[in-house]
Structures are given as structure tokens and as C-alpha cells.
Image (tube, rainbow, N blue to C red):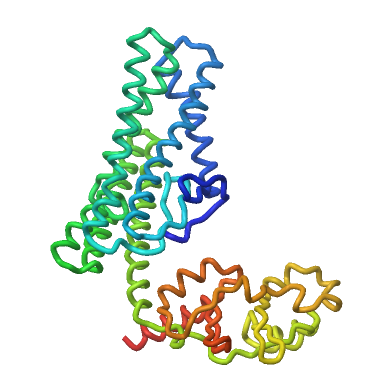
Amino acid sequence: MRAMRGIRVAKVAGFEISLDYSWFIIFFLILWTFTTVVFPHQYPGLERGAYVAMGVVGTLLFFASLLFHELSHSVVARMKGVPVEGITLFVFGGMARTRSEARSPADEFQIAGVGPLASLVVAAAFWIVGELTRARGGSEAVFGVSSYLAVLNLALAIFNLLPGFPLDGGRLFRAAVWRATNDLRKATRIATTGGRWIGYGIIAIGLAQLFFGGLIGGLWFIFIGWFLSGAADASYHQLLLQQVLEGIAAREAMTREPEMVRPDLTLDELVHEYFMRRRYSAFPVSDGDRLLGLIALSQVKEVPREQWPHRRVADVMTPLSKMVVVAPDASMSSVLERMRDSETRRVIVAQDGILLGIISAGDIADWLERARLLE
């Protein structure tokens, strides 16, 4: 799942750390569970403030553990030449956003395997802290948080070793099948099938818990199983998309010789003479033969309507310096990756400074649909 982004909060070891909006749900849910259920049940008799402190510290350290898990993946991936955009924490944990697959089964095995290993190291560290605290007669709160986080990280390592993609165990399994068959697509199909069925199994466990009265736990198992099965399918389709587009050049999918607009047009003229009379939602901006940038309908919509007669295209457009420009022989898989960096979600195709075409998400979708119909 490479498209997942969120609110940027920090940069660690060169990786951008983001929080998906769904993360706030799980953060406060875990905080509430730790504070009102887990620690009061396991360590009765402490003051209310102690439980709040244990909940806050435990929740923060738990997500720090998840971040460490994903950082381990990202560091090894970068060492193996796999570009990593950053890490996003969301409702079901964390995910490193990579731009491509590993180059070999061995690289895949190492990138996937370091995650559970990192969780085991964190579990051992928390266990040691807890045991030292108990041996020295230290705070029961410190012992409780450390011991519980040791168990959670151990459980995280074991769960991630399940042989279903996109879990780490599924990636390890895919690496083994990839090595045996020398076929990444086949290996991914087998591993994602395993992930889908493991997801169904987790959903079945959740339904069984609901039947026997475990409402909260049952719902969480159902949500996790549903997410895992959906992520498995999405991962396989993403690989297919990447492989299909790998052999396609930008010139084959671009809109050729797109109509251009002048930078001195008012937004009112642009809307009524172009956007309302053409099927396009963006136009390149040029001054004679010189390409200046691109103006999109979404940018015009951000300007108050009463300003349209006075504002010019040049005032609102995205300048060429901020556009993604590719050569006509660039592979569409790389174009798709670079399109994510474009503010307008469009890519300019040019050669020797001459505009040849423009590529939007709609152009890619249309090309894929034609390819599907021909097959």
C-alpha cells in the first residue's frame, strides 16, 4: 500500500513519519483500554493518577515500538536500493511507503525478516527492564508497563510471521516461492491467496467471539481480518499494474499535442471558453512556444468566484518548475510513481523543451481499460 499518506509529524533517520487520520482512533482507544481496563485489572490498588500515567506512557511506547518495527524495514529496504517515501502509522499499525518491489528474493527476505526480529528485540528490552525493576524493588507501574509491552511486542512478532501477504511472514513466504519459481507474479499470487484466507480465518474467529459474548474482541478480529484480506488483494493488483505499465512508454498513454492556454487569460475567460467547452480538466499554459506551467480546474475552484474576472491564469497556475516532466520513452510505471509527487496529479511529456503531451490519472485508466478489452 504505497499510496497511504497522512499528517507529517517528524523525520527519523531520513524517513518522513506521518499519521493517518485513522491513527487517532486507535491511539485513544488503546489509551482508554490501558487506563481503564488492562492496568487496573492486572495491578489493582494503585491510585487513579498512576493508571492514567501508565496508560499514556504505555500507549506512546507501544506506538514507538511499531515505529521501530517499520523503521527496521525502511532502513534495510534503503540499503537494498528500494526507495522509501516514508512511514505512515494508521488504525491497524504502521506501513512503510515504498516506490518499488525488492530486486531479488534474497533482498525481499531480508527486508521482511528484519521486522519481526526488531519486534523481538524490543520485547526482550522491555522484559529486561521489567525484570530489573522487579528485582530492585522498583515501581510497580514501571514493571507493569514494561512487562505488558514485552508481551505485546512478542505477540506482534508472532502475528507478523503468519504466512499471508502483506504480513512479514507472507513476504518471507513470497521470497521463498519467488526463489523456487523465479516468478515474482506467481509468488505474489500464492502469497496473497494465503493472506486472503488467513484474513477469512481471523474474521471467523471474530464471529465466533461475537457469538460467545466477546463483543469488543470479536469486532477487532473482524476488522483486522477484513483489512488483511483486502490488503492482500490490493497488493497483488498493485504488482500487476506495475508489471503491465513497466513495458509501456509515456508516449503510448499520453494525450498528444494538448490544447494550450495563454497566461494572460482571466479565470472567467478560462472557465467559460475552455473548461465549459472542452472535456479536459487541466490545460498547459504557454507564451508562444514557451511552456510556462499548467492550470487545473481544481485550482480555479479555490479562487472566489467574484475574483475570476480580475485574476489571470498566470496568477493561479502551477509553474513548470513545480511540474513533473518526463521524456516520451519513460516507462509508465515510473511515470505513475512520479505522478504522486505532482501537485496537479499530472505529468508533462516533453523532449528538448518541446511539449509533446500530458498524462493524467484518467489517461492511465483509459489505457489500462483498452488493454483489458484487447486481452
Q: At 34% across and 34% down in the image, what residue appears?
A: 153
> Is 35 drawn above or below residue 356 in the view shown?
above
Decide which of 323, 186 is in the foreground and name it: 323
> Is 357 drawn above or below residue 316 in the view shown?
below
Q: At 30% across and 61% down in the image, what residue appears?
A: 102
Residue with the most extreme top position = 137
> Is 157 drawn above or below residue 142 in the view shown?
below
Residue with the most extreme left position = 180
Quadrant containing the C terminus is bottom left
Q: At 29% across and 42% down in the image, what residue appears?
A: 116
The image position of residue 213, as x and y in percent, is 37, 33
The image position of residue 147, as x and y in percent, is 35, 22
Q: At 33% across and 47% down in the image, what residue appears?
A: 203
The image quarter in which residue 318 lies: bottom right
Q: Is residue 334 left or right of residue 113?
A: right
Q: Is residue 93 left or right of residue 267?
A: left
The image position of residue 148, as x and y in percent, is 37, 25
Quadrant containing the N terminus is bottom left
The image quarter in which residue 125 lies: top left
Q: Is residue 329 left or right of residue 244?
A: right
Decide which of 286, 310 is in the foreground and name it: 286
Decide which of 359, 71 is in the foreground and name it: 71
Residue with the most extreme front position = 352
Decide which of 292, 346 is in the foreground and name it: 292
The image position of residue 146, as x and y in percent, is 39, 23
Q: Is residue 117 left or right of residue 35?
A: left
User: So how many labels did they put on this image?
Assistant: 0
